[in-house]
Amino acid sequence: MPSSHPFPSCSTRSFPQARDRAKLELLKLQGDQEMATIAVQMQAIVAEAQSNDPWTSRARPSFLYMMYTLILWSIPMGLIAAADPKMAQGIASGMTAYLRGIPEELYALFGTGYLGYTAARTWGKVKGVER
């Protein structure tokens, strides 16, 4: 059966190494593009962290401290539960109702902010900009 390719002897089936090299080059270009995008994002995060504006430079750490406080609240809640289980149940029910009222987008924002802040700090330390 004749091939529909105009130059059957020049098809990629005849040159598997060339096809593989082309695939590798394409993957490399895609990786370079992703790295460039990450680098631009990192520059924006580092610029925010180094801002002279106290609202900008302290926003992420303040948000993280608030989240740490919520997580660490489990320690006194454990003590309250040991002393008065009904009171602990009431407090837990109230906190659960409150936390379920927070929109999912804010939880996503927390995750993004946490990871962005961590990445910016790591990037700054690797580059020698921060201690």
Image (tube, helix red, strand yellow):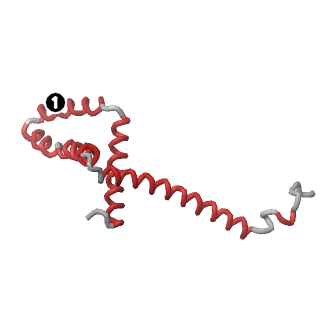
Near-viewer residue (72 or 127): 127
Name, please, the residue furthest toward the bottom. 17
Near-viewer residue (111 or 130): 130
Name, please, the residue furthest toward the front. 52
Residue 128, position as x, y percentages in the image: 32, 67
Q: Quadrant of residue 26?
A: bottom right
Residue 54 appears left or right of 109: left
Q: Which residue is mark 1?
A: 90
Q: Residue at x 72, y 68 (%)?
A: 18
Residue 21, position as x, y percentages in the image: 67, 67
Residue type, label 1: Gly
Residue 84 appears left or right of 99: left
Residue 101 appears left or right of 41: left
Q: Residue at x 79, y 64 (%)?
A: 13
- SS under mark 1: helix
Name, please, the residue furthest toward the left. 83
Q: Residue at x 66, y 62 (%)?
A: 23
Q: Quadrant of the N terminus?
A: bottom right
Residue 87 appears left or right of 32: left
